[in-house]
Image: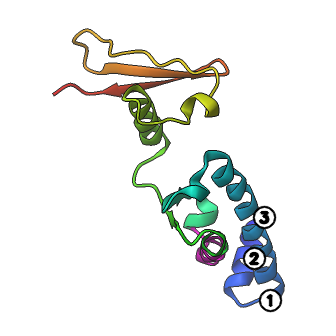
């Protein structure tokens, strides 16, 4: 159904445009909850990353969402990530190990961050973050 609404909105159908704008507002409501919980609303500027086909394939939806979020937070820049989810997980784990992510303990309890381990393998594990029985490992390829 979303694809049909998207196509109708591209064609100028006002009802479809209204549906997309409502969806963008509701998604911005969710983002706002995260912004407040993480304290980004108190920052001079912050990035809000978006991903997924609804943003990539639907420029009208992306524009509506971007306008909605930046109208609430002029200090926000809405961006597409430069990497994929694995890149983000590795970056978060690395930042956690370096002590650069202060909110991680509140965000992902219980969190386990381990120091550098690995013994000359092709990939070196530099840390792990555990959450609800799942583990994200940060690895790097040694030079």
Q: Which residue is mark 1?
A: 14
Magenta stretch bounds:
57-67
Left or right of 56 in this view: 97: left
Tell me whether circle 2 and circle 3 mark residues in contact (CB < 8 Å): no
Residue 109: % across, % down: 64, 24
Say whether disc 2 or disc 1 marks the residue closer to the N-terminus: 1
First of labels 2, 3 by sequence position = 2
Q: Quadrant of the N terminus?
A: bottom right
Secondary structure of the residue carrying numbered label 1: helix
Magenta stretch: includes residue 58: yes
Is mark 2 in CB contact (under 8 Å) with mark 1? no
Q: Which residue is mark 2?
A: 21
In this figure, which residue is indicated by the disc labeled 3? 26
Q: Give the camera-side residue of 137 and 101.
A: 101
Q: Is residue 82 visible in the rendered structure shown here?
A: yes
Is tag 3's residue or tag 1's residue first in the polypeptide sequence? Answer: 1
User: Would you identify the image quadrant in which residue 24 lies?
Assistant: bottom right
Of circles 3 and 1, the one toward us is 3
Q: Secondary structure at mark 3?
A: helix
Is there any visible trace of residue 51 in the rendered image? no
């Amino acid at each position: 159904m979303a694809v049909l609404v998207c196509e109708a909105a591209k064609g100028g159908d006002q009802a479809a445009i209204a549906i997309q704008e409502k969806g963008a507002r509701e998604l911005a409501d969710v983002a706002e909850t995260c912004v407040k919980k993480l304290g980004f609303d108190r920052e001079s500027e912050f990035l809000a990353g978006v991903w997924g086909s609804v943003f990539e394939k639907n420029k009208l939806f992306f524009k509506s969402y971007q306008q909605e979020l930046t109208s609430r937070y002029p200090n926000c820049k809405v961006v597409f990530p430069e990497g994929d989810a694995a890149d983000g997980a590795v970056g978060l784990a690395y930042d956690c190990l370096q002590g650069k992510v202060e909110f991680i303990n509140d965000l992902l309890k219980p969190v386990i961050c381990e120091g550098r381990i690995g013994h000359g393998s092709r990939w070196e594990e530099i840390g792990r973050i555990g959450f609800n029985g799942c583990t994200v490992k940060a690895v790097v390829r040694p030079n």
